[in-house]
Amino acid sequence: MEGQGSYPPQGPSAPPHPPGPVLYAPNYYEAPPASAVDTYVPERSPAFYQQMQVAWMQAPAPIPNCPPGLEYLTMIDQIFVYQLFEFIEALTGFETKNKYELKNSMGQRVYFAVEESEFCNRLCCGANRAFSIKIMDNLNQTVLNLVRPLGCHSCWCPCLHHRMEVQAPPGTIIGYVVQEWNPCIPILSIQNEMSETILKIRGPCMQFSCCGDVNFKVLSKDESTVVGKISKKWTGLLREFFTDADNFGIQFPMDLDVKVKAVLIGACIMVDFFVL
């Protein structure tokens, strides 16, 4: 019979194709050339590529008696705060809204912080301006809110010193960062939600160091023991001279209360507005 022995059958005797998938003989299908596979790029939105550029720290499981989103802090004993460079601010000298990335020692982003403040307030009051800073996790949920009214960190205005309120979650106060009066050096008190002092932060007389870090010691309440430190990192002559975008490192004990760690993050932001 015509077509006998060939596959698929040929000629008028060939049965009609079944409704299911067509079966091919072995070695009938040829894969596309490797170059075609290598050059294929699926369409992605710009937001997809922007997200892929940032390595986020994996979210830990919820912990009892820990404010939502602060579980990250139970796993680390140091965190790095990077202020993002603003070209417009460097070009014009006008204060823009500060933005920060908070990363762990492996370079993974833990939080992202954005300032909310009025333009006239930034223009007229500079580093003494009132602001709120929202600190968000990788789900874009606000886990910390830092609120600081208008004040003055000059030693000549002791009645207008700064006091920052730390909320976690927003609306729930977990502590304060309070500037103490001192004619020579910056001193901050770390307080709990009852306004009771837990730790002290003492900085150097000169908050600027050429080609070196500036360290603020985190001390016990009686200032007899060094608990940790907040360090302003040297970022290079050009960046130090033309911008106020600073980088910081915070070190604290691993077993420190997670709420106190969160207040220390607020203290680091406060220090950023103090240093030159």
Image (tube, helix red, strand yellow):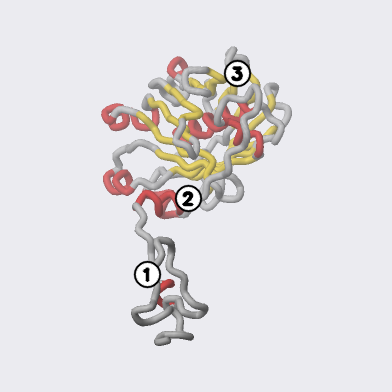
Q: Nearer the viewer, residue 233 or 257?
A: 257
Mark 1 secondary-structure assignment = loop
Name above or below for residue 53 compared with residue 180.
Answer: below
Badge 3 amino acid: Asn
**Alpha carbon of mark 2 to alpha carbon of mark 1: how far?**
55 Å
Mark 2 secondary-structure assignment = loop
Which image quarter: residue 119? top left
**Alpha carbon of mark 3 to alpha carbon of mark 1: how far?**
82 Å
Q: Is residue 129 shown to the viewer in this render?
A: yes
Q: Quadrant of the C terminus?
A: top left
Q: Nearer the viewer, residue 12 or 113?
A: 12
**Alpha carbon of mark 2 to alpha carbon of mark 3: how far?**
33 Å
Q: Which mark is residue 54?
A: 2
Badge 2 amino acid: Val
Q: Are marks 3 and 1 in contact (CB under 8 Å)?
A: no
Q: Is residue 126 left or right of residue 217?
A: left
- Kindly identify which residue carries mark 3: 192
Q: Residue at x 38, y 81 (%)?
A: 10
Q: Is residue 100 left or right of residue 70?
A: left
Q: Quadrant of the N terminus?
A: bottom left
